[in-house]
Amino acid sequence: MSEQTAPLPPALDELVDDFASVPARDRLQLLLELSDELPPLPERYAGHAEAMEQVHECQSPLFLAVELDDERRVHVFFDAPPESPTTRGFAGILHTGLDGLPAEEVLAVPDDAPFRFGLAEAVSPLRLRGMVAMLSRVKRQVRARLAA
Amino acid sequence: MPVPHDPDAKLGAYAHPERLVTTQWLADHLEDEGLVVVESDEDVLLYDSGHIPGAVKVDWHTDLNDPVLRDYVDGARFAEVLGARGIRRDTTVVFYGDKNNLWAAYALWVFTLFGHEDVRLLDGGRAKWIAEGREITRDVPERTPVEYPVVQRDDAPIRAFREDVLAELGSSKLVDVRSPGEFSGELLHMPDYPQEGAMRGGHIPGARSVPWARAAAEDATFKSRDDLAAIYEQEKGLKPSDDVIAYCRIGERSSHTWFVLTHLLGFQRVRNYDGSWTEWGNTVRVPIETGADA
């Protein structure tokens, strides 16, 4: 049970509340908004897929990059095509929830976080695997940056 | 009044032209009474990001698959899904979707399991509609719910199970519609997809390899009848009278091939083995083969 209740960072927690406060049908709308609002890549990544990591577990192509700034805060960058709104929406959740957090807080995000948005019913558990994979790859990259 | 068929000349060459409509025909008939447009995609949010005006969404995961048993929904649930979308038993349903209509063909096949009679595919699917600059909207139509009868699914004519495949090894003609890498045993899923889902790689003994998307042209429409016949009949030696079983990984790609063989080439007995490689490649002591197609 301890895993179920491990706390989330505030921005991610807020998103969980947003999703929990609407019926399943509207959760998809919320996910679509996050997909729409996913920020475009900065110039240093745009058109440079080779500088990013591909998340093969996603149903459709998704690339991500992780940076640590001088204060050891995490910045995440995601790229997925508009024809893959679910994948973009998952990326939007993680961007909103994780970007700007101290590295330690990102590493402390429980691996079951993707299952707390009530999306399993709306998008199916199988599809959620993509978000699980994104989160684990973000954390792995943060670890690698810290070690570098 | 029944919805008329699309008299387009290219469609006219297929064995069952009434199973396809062109984008122009659909644009002209969107308001027809008795016609409902259904979008089915791989991405569950794609419909919500914009769809053909008036179209409703049917999702293969959440609407057509039983959430517990590995099977399709039963008659009661199917009636609920269709009734809620304003689809009656005699409604003409036009399916379209992403990825060369892959999931649209899958939904059409599931509707056929329930004997829904007038099912058609939009030739070229979502990609062609959008490429032609036709209208797309985010407005979800308010459909008045109707009564759809609870009908028993009739699997036997178009669905094959593991036992059928095992019993007919060597007598039925098997068509493996996955990628060459999956067929040979190198990959366990489509290229670029996560490699999960089976203990062994390879194919069912005797199967011929015809990747499903070979049936699609550049613009996502189906190839002409002659081009399709060249692939399935001349190149692979299948005959319209053959007993054919098509399979892939979970039965979605092979329902596309089922559509091609049944409705476009007029094969009389084609079944889709939806257990496909995720069942066969995980089953203890069923025979498999590895290596490229002969």
Image: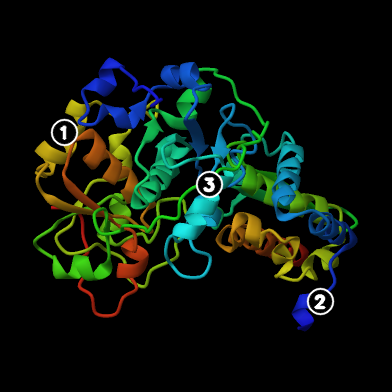
Q: Which residue is mark 3?
A: B147
Q: Relative to the observer, which residue lies in front, B294 or B153?
A: B153
Decide: is B166 above or below B125.
Answer: below
Q: Secondary structure at mark 2?
A: helix
Q: Which residue is mark 2?
A: A5
Identify the subunit bearing mark 3: B
Decide: is B102 above or below A2.
Answer: above
- N-terminal of the two: label 3 or label 1? 3
- Foreground label between 3 and 1: 3
Q: Secondary structure at mark 1?
A: helix
Placement of the N terminus of chain A among the 4 image quadrants: bottom right
The answer to whether mark 1 and mark 2 are in CB contact below 8 A is no
- Foreground label between 3 and 2: 3
Q: Which residue is mark 1?
A: B229
Q: What kind of residue is marked 1?
A: Ala
Say whether residue A131 is visible.
Answer: no
Task: Residue B286: give x, y in percent of width and height.
Answer: 23, 75
Q: Are marks 3 and 1 on the same chain?
A: yes
